[in-house]
Amino acid sequence: MVSTECSASSRMTVAADGDLPVMAPGSGPRDSVDGAGPGKAVGQAAEGILDVQVVAGATAAVRRLLAAYASTLDVLDDVPVTPMVATRWHWWSRPSAPIRLPRISWMLRSLTLWHIDRVLTGAERIFRRRSALGIAGAGEADALNAVTEFRASLPSRSRVLRIGVLAVAALVVAHLLATLLVNLNRTVGASIPLSASINRIPFLAIINRIPFFARINWISLSASINQLLNSTLDALQLTSGSAGLVLDALFKASPAVLAAAAALVSLSLYLILWPVACAFRLKRLLLNLYPHADSRLSSTPASWSMTRSTGVYDLEQETFAMLGARVPREPPLDLLVSLPIPICWISLWVYSVAFLAIGTGLAADLPVVLILGGFVLLFYITPAAMRLAWLAAAWRSRNGRPRSAWLFGDEVSVPWRSKPVRCRSPLLIGWLSLMLPYTCLIIWWLWWSTTRHLRELGRAYDVKHLRGMHPAAQALAAGPGVVLYGLPTLIVLSRAPRFVREAQAATGLERPVPRHIAWLVLIWPVLCVRLQRELNRLWQGPGIQIDQHDEAIDLAARPAV
């Protein structure tokens, strides 16, 4: 591995190198009109020294960035085909030895090389632009040569060829799915009527009642899709009449066939891009873990790098900031692949509820429509909407925006406990508290773990009401107490703000939670959201020396597994 650590003294030595620009004297009366004089000359000289230092620092940053790329490629050579990557689901194991699952690394090298080539192409373009404008420093030519030589040393990867291969693979998979649908429809139609088999599935029965879907002949539609995709694949032979046959088939196809074929191709493309998205997350993990990627790859969860940009990303930001430019934005491939499922899920349920309310005559019965809409909103649409919000917040945090305290949860180290404490998403806790069938189990689990942490804090800071807490009794009263008309649960939840307030006051946290929010126990989901928000502030408070795992160097402090 190439070492790229650079101390502050070495950076200053590099920044001090270079020739100072020669300041030309003024020219007569124009100098007095423009305000030129000894003071302006001194200011211009100071600006020239600053520019030289910035240019020299940018040159050194380019060298460090190239060394980081070389080190990442060296680590990439030792990554197996299916590397074992840690997960966050390790509550029954030690945090230093999490559960590991195999990940797909298909196209990992290509994605890494494309990332390096895109960033270096942007850096090379900036260097050439500065040289053309005459503002390039003395050391920028060497940096440009280093970038050009490093790009030339990379293996060639044709992006157009690989995108074309992905498109052809999507067509092939779509053709296979269409053929499977044709054979399945013929087999099912020969024994059981297709409409009867569809009506046996509750959700498909609702969809089949929609007039647009009820008029579709699924056997004929599958055959038409199969024929359209077959002619499209024949066009790849690049014969003289192949393109004409494809255009003729497209113009003759009905809108239903075109829409179904597009949906089938989109599904095939999603199935193909899913393993590519897994490799994309591995690529981000490697870049985020620099310079400890070789030793921490198997012990760091892949989800840790989804919302962070450290390691090599920091070096890229530093290099382009010194040149007065922005880093070429990384396309969020893994986040884009995660978008279709929640979007389609929300669309299907909204359309189904609208059809049931209008098409079946339920619109006249307003209470039934409200109950049905609230049920669908709570159990089906809310989780998908939270997933979309989480993806948007992850994309923002990758680009340097502040991390969302309502959607993200991190593990933090606190001084009174050897194991890390989990900061949970307040919105997720609020939604879970609304899941009435599972409220007993959820409240018991959450309050049991929370009271354990509060008791340890009370014993460390000698807080009277906290050090004598009994987590098992508190959890039994909060969870199974729901069965007893909810009275024990209401008592526990109404006393929770007092416990959190005393813990915050003991650790020196400013603006502790007021005790009067206990009246929110009548609307317990709001109280759960507020309490979780205050607990996150408690674990991450300024009065506690927190060792957050937000940077790759924090991971280096973990013991190697």
Image (cartoon, helix red, strand yellow):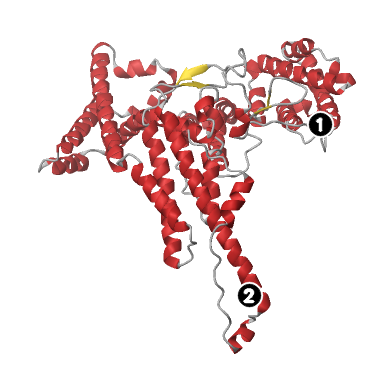
Q: Residue at x 76, y 34 (%)?
A: 541
Nearest-to-viewer mark from 1 and 2: 2
201 left or right of 467? left
Q: Residue at x 47, y 31 (%)?
A: 281
> Which numbered marker is on residue 41?
2
Residue placed most toward the observer, 473 or 114: 114
Residue placed most toward the observer, 340 or 551: 551
* Residue 291 seen in this snapshot: yes
What is the x, y in percent for residue 353? 50, 30
Q: Secondary structure at mark 1?
A: helix
Q: Residues within 10 Å of mark 1 (few under 14, many from 20)?
A: some
In the image, what residue type sits under mark 2? Answer: Ala
Q: Mark 1 or mark 2: which comes first in sequence?
A: 2
432 left or right of 479? left
Q: Residues within 10 Å of mark 2 (few under 14, many from 20)?
A: some
**Residue at numbered disc 1:** 517
499 left or right of 53? right
What is the x, y in percent for residue 511? 82, 38
Q: Secondary structure at mark 2?
A: helix
